Image (cartoon, grey):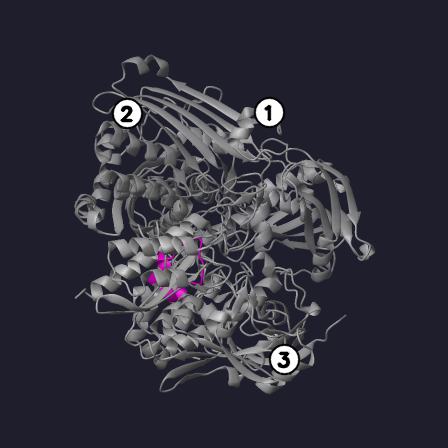
Amino acid sequence: MSRSQCMLRFTVNGQDRAVRVFPMKRLLDVLREDLRLTGTKEGCGEGECGSCSIRMNGALVNSCLVPVLQAEGADIQTVEGLATSGSLHPLQQAFLQCGGAQCGICTPGMLMAATQLLSINPHPTMAEIREGLAGNLCRCTGFIRIFDSVIAAAARNQSSDQAVHAR
Amino acid sequence: MSTNAKTRIVGAPVLRKEGVDKLLGRARYVDDIDREGMWPGATVRSTIPRGFIRSIGFDRRIDWSEFTIVSAADIPGKNHVQLIFADQPCLADGIVNHCDEAILLLAHPDKHKLREAVDAVHIEYEPLPPIFTIEESERQELVVWGSDNVVKSFLLEKGDVDSVWADAAHIVEGEYRTGAQEHLYIENNGVIADWNEAAGITVWGSLQCPYYVHRSLLAVFDLPEDKVRVIQTETGGAFGGKEDYPSTLAAHAALLAMKSCHPIKMVYDRMEDLAATTKRHPSRIRHRTALDKDGKLLAMDIDIATDAGAYSTLSSTVLSRATLHSPGPYVCPNVRIRSRAWATNTVPYGAFRGFGAPQAIFAIERHMDEIASEIDIDPIELRRRNFLHDGDTTATEQVMRDPVILDQLLDRALRESDYHAKRARFATENPTSAVKRGMGVAAFYHGSGFTGSGERYLNSLAGVDVTPVGKLRVLVANTEFGQGTNTILTQIAAEAIGIGYDDVIMAPADTGIVPNSGPTVASRTSMVVGRLIERACSQLIAMLREHAGLGEHFTSEEFFEASERYRAAHGEVVSLCRYEAPPNVFWDDQKYRGEAYPAYAWSIQIAQVAVDTVTYSAEVEDFWAVQEVGRVLNPVLAGGQIEGGVAQGIGYALYEKVVLQSGHMANNQMTNYIMPTAEDVPLIHVFFEEIPFQHGAFGAKGIGELPHDGPAPAILNAIKDATGVSFRSIPLLPEDLFEKLVAREIVEEAATI
Amino acid sequence: MRGNPDAHEIVAPGNLAAVLDLLAGAPGEWTPIAGGTELMVAHAAGRLAAPKLVSLWGIRELRFIKTGADTISIGAGTTFRELRADAGVAAHLPLLVKAASWIGSIANQSRATVGGNLVNGSPAADSSPALLVYDAEVELISARGSRRIPYSEFHTGYKRNAMAPDELLFAVHLPLRFARHRQYLRKVGTRRAMAISKVALAGTATVEKGVVSELRLAAASLAPFPVRLYKTETALLGKPINSSTIQSAREALLAEAKPIDDIRSTSEYRKRVAANLLEEFLVELRSESPPK
């Protein structure tokens, strides 16, 4: 028996979007397939690796575990929404300088987790950084230079006038 | 090109070449790519470890006319995956030899219907008795491969081992085991294949070696070289897991593309990737060692057994490297190494960072600590008394002509880790603490590049050209998968010519565009391929000086202007170089004697481990890695390689276990195959010493695999230091620590009654 | 992705009454889904059997934390992130805050709900041991009304619970009477984060006049569902804490615990570690309450 698709609306990276999809389609697949935002990745489909992490209504979530129906009306941020016209986000700049990305597949999710962390806790301790990123697996870096990147971005925030835009 | 010359770009922490795209989420991995008319493909796999296929049934509830179905019968050329031997079929034909072996391929435009269809194929088997362990294979009661289950064997002999036992002051024996390990790249294996009459086959994929895949497809499809094109897509981690496996996957997708007349995408999900693709070879290594009264090595008798799985894949070369790394970085006049790779009915094992060295080094470095405690010499001192030095010969009679600075590395590692003070402190704290702490050391080398005559056989070709829009383009088939290939090779080219880092770009790793510069494996890229790029750049400058008026000194602008003058006269501006073996390199492939590797990277690693006697879990609290890898081409990338390799080595030692049930990986989900998270990794302190290697690009040697060799023995040596209990097998999980620690507690309790 | 979105109907009525009417109208036909951190994993694995799902996500009536004079009430739709951030929970129910920090990862905590954790009924459920030693009550609600039962009676077997087909878990109520109790909670997993419990032990206790006057012990992964360890409690109640009673308590726990071997761990390991955790708790109790 065929179920019906439905029209769902939400905001992605500040833009209003509408899709006609099966409500049990995963938000991850809607982002990647219907909206062609392929920056968010699938690494496991189980909510273990975090490469599908996005920010939804101000919270970090694994988009592979969200039925798109539950994203109706939500304010969503993906990696594509970090940089602002021509400039890397301070976290992206820090990752670039510190070597926080190697193969890059975990990077979008890691950036989302780091953005979330710094939006709630602009000057995290090492323990808080580790906890904030514990849901994002990186097989290449051993995490060390990812920690360095977050510390560098936090330090830069401290000395700059611009606050990280918290959603 | 002087390896000691001052450089502006090489050695500098220039930014990752493709970094911005990765950070913006713009980098395109294979699953991000769609082609018009593309269908997903899927694989029907064996559910038994060994047996004949009696029948294949298709459930009537599916309309199979909508599907493309491929079996072995559809293979136009040879039904095998060409690696070393040709024993692995591309698709099972009448018999399966391991669980999850590919039998049928299906394609359909709707991925959900495709999924249903996979479950609707019913295969009837006539099971044959399977074997699952090295020991079962050795008994040879059941022969599942060749005539005797032995996929490969080596015998390496130096001196006369048997002449020594009778008079030796000490003889120490030990057996050491390592388990399988999964690469766990965060991007699963995946390819897209297309076929048409005119172009032949094109494959895009997450892979390390486009030309390996190319060669494999030629055999499967019986096509000429120019009718197969393989293009690497941005690759999300590999570690060896995309060295051999993509040849199989590419053939599968191409078969479906050919039969369906549609582009086909096959990207595994995590469950399938974990269950069906290659992993690190499990091993059992036995040492019997004779020493004199001062703890100097007199003889090493080593027996190596690896589990190859059901087909050979790269088992012979993994065994080779294990053999050559098994004696450790020590001088020993008499050595015998017998090694064999044994076939079992498990998913074939393959390449994984270290490639036999982690297994071998685990055994020797654990064994050195066991010797130390048995003959009552400090483990550091024991190593110092036996280290290789300049001019010494190895087990293959290779003379160490380049400096060997193990003592210096060890001094630095001990100092940076505050090793002696910490051990003293732990010795006083441990007796009254529930958490016992210890320090452990591992000393090792990693041979850079292919063994012996391997590079001659590869006969790599690489170089540069200049594009009409004014960029120097690096032409190599070597791939970026996080380790820094793009950055390093552009640094080398920019430095070698004398232009800016941004003046250089990488040509795509596309067999239709770049020459075969060999695979991206064996820690050879910087050293060997980088060297070819260096030479090609020198050659290009010479060409432009001779034919296009390029001056003795020149600016970037002048370089590109001269290139355009050259192009006007000759049509293109390209400079390629072929591999040349360093002089005086002698290698006997039969006797395994001579220069085993052109260069060695050297390392000392120290682990500080805490063992919690309430939960029996061991955690690495701190870690130091000191290494000599020739010239460090980019300190950020090099440091990242060491840190990442150490983290994987920690996983190998304490967290990562492949649980097989009847030959099938039962824990094939990330929730049950455990790698360390950001909360589990220690800080990793990295220190480089640099002795430029004259035959490597700007003095570089290999670096990528070295750091994975040492953590496991360093950690288990630390656990022995902390608890006094010897563990000789990895992965070492709390359940394993528990068994031995509790048994000892019971003994201690009994002793106090 | 092995699941088929087209094979499942999901509706989001948006308010509690509508959900209860739906459940009443077709008892057992609708599977409630809150944050999806369990059901969506099954969906991706092709193992989601439920053809009809009703979303509880965002329903305000289910998402609350009320701190009263003698009770804290937590709506079943409350996420673990919300639990961690609540001042009342932090002040009165520290074990629950600790347990909440163990759930998956930050991303999982944003979506996983208290209700989901309990109804999923894994023997390894992270919040259960703390709830058991805090004498939690669960409130079950349906179109017919609501009822409360002790949480200790909620689980009736492996992945089976006391709810009727038309019922929903509405809230968890926790009495605020553990301020004076010593409290303990420790989880042992495969790693420090993102780990399913191999074993976890929770405890609340008072020691008066040198003997254990109140004791509640609860464990994860020692039985088909999270349980109070009544026999082990009995072995200690009214007794002083010394090496002899610690030893007999260990033995009582080893006898009471019925863990299994599974893909994550072994029965022997779980029993032994649980006994070690118990000893660790008892030693803490002894050191904080010196005998008279």
**Mark 2 sits on what residue?**
B391
According to the picture, the residue beneath numbered tag 1 turns out to be: B141
Q: CA distance from mark 3 to mark 1?
A: 63 Å
* Image quadrant where one finds the C terminus of chain C: bottom left
Q: CA distance from mark 1 to mark 2?
A: 47 Å
- Left of C177 or right of it: where is C52? right
Q: Earlier in the sequence, mark 1 or mark 2?
A: 1
Crowd band around label 2 with a 10 angstrom C-alpha radius: few (<14), some (14–19), many (20+): few
Viewer-nearest of discs 2 and 3: 3
Please determine whether, in this image, residue B513 is positioned above or below residue A66. above
The image quadrant that residue B649 belongs to is top left
The numbered mark at residue A8 is: 3
The image position of residue C109, as x and y in percent, is 45, 70
Viewer-nearest residue: B661 or B418:
B661
Instruction: Please state the horizontal and vertical placement of residue C269, each as a whole percent of the image.
Output: 41, 49
Q: Magenta stretch: give its range.
A: A131-148
Q: Amino acid at mark 3?
A: Leu
